[in-house]
């Protein structure tokens, strides 16, 4: 694979420098935390020896091999985008859950941290591109576990077929797009993994129809690695490709890297620990992660009466703000409603673990008491 690495068309975007004051403000809609800001501009996907950089290059190689010189690459587009680009232009309806500040980081009422690379589809189509790959960091308020992290990386792929290509295929444009999409992504999965168990699942996205998800069998479970589909005609029509058909996909680079390199926990992508980083080298898809240590987790339970504003994402955000990457998992273990008072009690179990060292009791107790205090002060929860 390494020997085929080719420099294909790349476009520099001259992304503005990330300034804290531009991203964290006292605007009432602003819900970006410092913990998140610190991840911005790190660009793990642009480090050639990082597992995410290796996966990105391997995908570039596959497209280069299948369609030499055809796909334009973008990997440094600014992650702060308009609500219009992130949602409106890809037809995400008003009131769709993903627009909710419980799920998305808002800089102000009209500006978000992109929650998917689909935020760039329309603008790049308007440049007249018909085949492109966009890689970038994306941001979502989410729960905490081994495969979910509030910052992760996606690669978007889009291909638009010309009327000539459709005519030559002898099927409808939509059928050509669907067939080519599945063929392309199955080929990609084989390029990365060799023989792997995979399955297509019907899905829904506002910007594609029909829509699918690809799942790969990983550690005894089906893991969703990408979403895709036939691009809504309205998007192509509105952005300079009237009447043409095409496909789009958005894949999770961490998910693919976890499967390929046997990386058990999504937090490892962010570690500075050389025992992790030195296991990976540009172009080497054969590396398999060798755990260098397994420090014991420390579990702490917290119980409280919930209130109207309470959401699990808010809890997870708070835990991450206090504990950073020491928070491995936050899990609801008890949920009951008192019949007489109508009040609901939740108990969450928080697993703290470092990838790099053992945690002291004192350290974990301090973190937990800060978490408890902030649950009471910031989320106005009545602790039990
Ligand atoms: C999307 O983001 C769509 N924009 C994908 C798409 C593009 C569909 C173009 C159709 C056409 P979804 O939310 O399912 O879809 O995320 C896509 C992938 O990102 C998932 O399959 C998964 O691999 C990855 N992903 C999603 N959430 C997380 C998370 N919290 N942590 C790590 N990876 C995640
Ligand atoms: Mg999904």
Image (cartoon, helix red, strand yellow):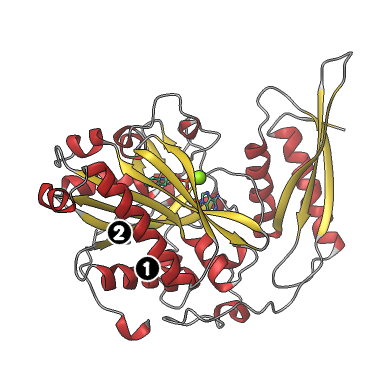
Q: Secondary structure at mark 1?
A: helix
Q: Is residue 157 visible?
A: no
Mark 2 = which residue?
133
User: What x and y, as percent, mark residue 185?
Assistant: 39, 59
Residue at 24% from the left image edge and 35% from the top image edge: 233
Q: Is residue 249 visible?
A: yes
Taking the image as shown, residue 279 lies to the left or right of residue 92, namely: right
- Measured along the vertical axis of the image, is residue 167 above or below residue 284? above
| Image quadrant in which you'd find residue 61 | bottom left
Q: Secondary structure at mark 2?
A: strand
Observer-nearest residue: 90 or 24? Answer: 90
Q: Is mark 2 within 8 Å of ligand 1?
A: no
| Image quadrant in which you'd find residue 318 | top right
Q: Residue furthest front?
A: 170
User: What x and y, as percent, mark residue 332?
Assistant: 77, 40
Taking the image as shown, residue 168 lies to the left or right of residue 201, namely: left
Q: Quadrant of the N terminus?
A: bottom left
Q: Which mark is residue 207?
A: none
Taking the image as shown, residue 255 lies to the left or right of residue 119, namely: right
Q: Which mark is residue 59?
A: 1
Contact, CB < 8 Å: mark 1 with mark 2? Answer: yes
Label 2: how many Cα within 10 Å (few below 14, some 14–19, many 20+): many
User: What x and y, as percent, mark residue 303?
Assistant: 84, 36
């Amino acid at each position: 694979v390494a020997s085929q690495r080719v420099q294909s068309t790349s476009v520099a975007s001259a992304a503005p420098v990330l300034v804290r004051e531009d991203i964290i403000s006292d605007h009432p809609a602003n819900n970006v935390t410092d913990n998140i800001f610190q991840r911005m501009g790190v660009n793990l996907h642009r480090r050639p020896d990082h597992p995410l950089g290796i996966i990105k290059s391997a995908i570039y190689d596959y497209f280069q091999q299948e369609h030499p010189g055809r796909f334009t690459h973008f990997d440094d587009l600014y992650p702060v985008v308009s609500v219009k680009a992130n949602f409106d232009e890809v037809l995400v309806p008003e009131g769709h859950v993903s627009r909710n500040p419980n799920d998305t980081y808002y800089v102000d009422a009209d500006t978000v941290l992109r929650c998917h690379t689909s935020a760039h589809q329309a603008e790049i189509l308007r440049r007249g591109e018909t085949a492109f790959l966009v890689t970038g960091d994306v941001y979502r308020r989410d729960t905490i576990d081994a495969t979910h992290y509030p910052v992760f990386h996606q690669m978007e792929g889009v291909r638009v077929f010309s009327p000539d290509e459709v005519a030559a295929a002898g099927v409808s444009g939509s059928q050509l797009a669907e067939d080519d999409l599945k063929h392309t992504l199955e080929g990609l999965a084989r390029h990365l993994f060799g023989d792997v168990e995979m399955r297509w699942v019907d899905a829904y996205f506002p910007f594609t129809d029909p829509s699918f998800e690809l799942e790969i069998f990983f550690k005894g479970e089906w893991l969703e690695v990408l979403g895709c589909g036939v691009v809504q005609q309205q998007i192509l029509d509105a952005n300079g490709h009237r009447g043409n058909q095409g496909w789009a996909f958005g894949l999770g680079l961490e998910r693919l890297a976890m499967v390929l390199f046997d990386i058990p926990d999504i937090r490892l992508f962010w570690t500075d620990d050389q025992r992790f980083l030195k296991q990976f080298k540009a172009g080497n898809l054969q590396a398999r992660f060798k755990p260098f240590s397994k420090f014991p987790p420390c579990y702490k339970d917290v119980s409280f009466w919930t209130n109207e504003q309470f959401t699990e994402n808010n809890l997870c955000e708070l835990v991450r703000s206090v504990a950073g990457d020491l928070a491995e998992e936050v899990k609801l273990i008890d949920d009951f409603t008192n019949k007489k008072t109508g009040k609901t009690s939740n108990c969450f179990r928080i697993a703290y673990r470092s990838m790099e060292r053992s945690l002291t009791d004192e350290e974990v107790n301090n973190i937990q008491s800060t978490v408890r205090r902030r649950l009471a002060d910031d989320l106005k929860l009545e602790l039990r």
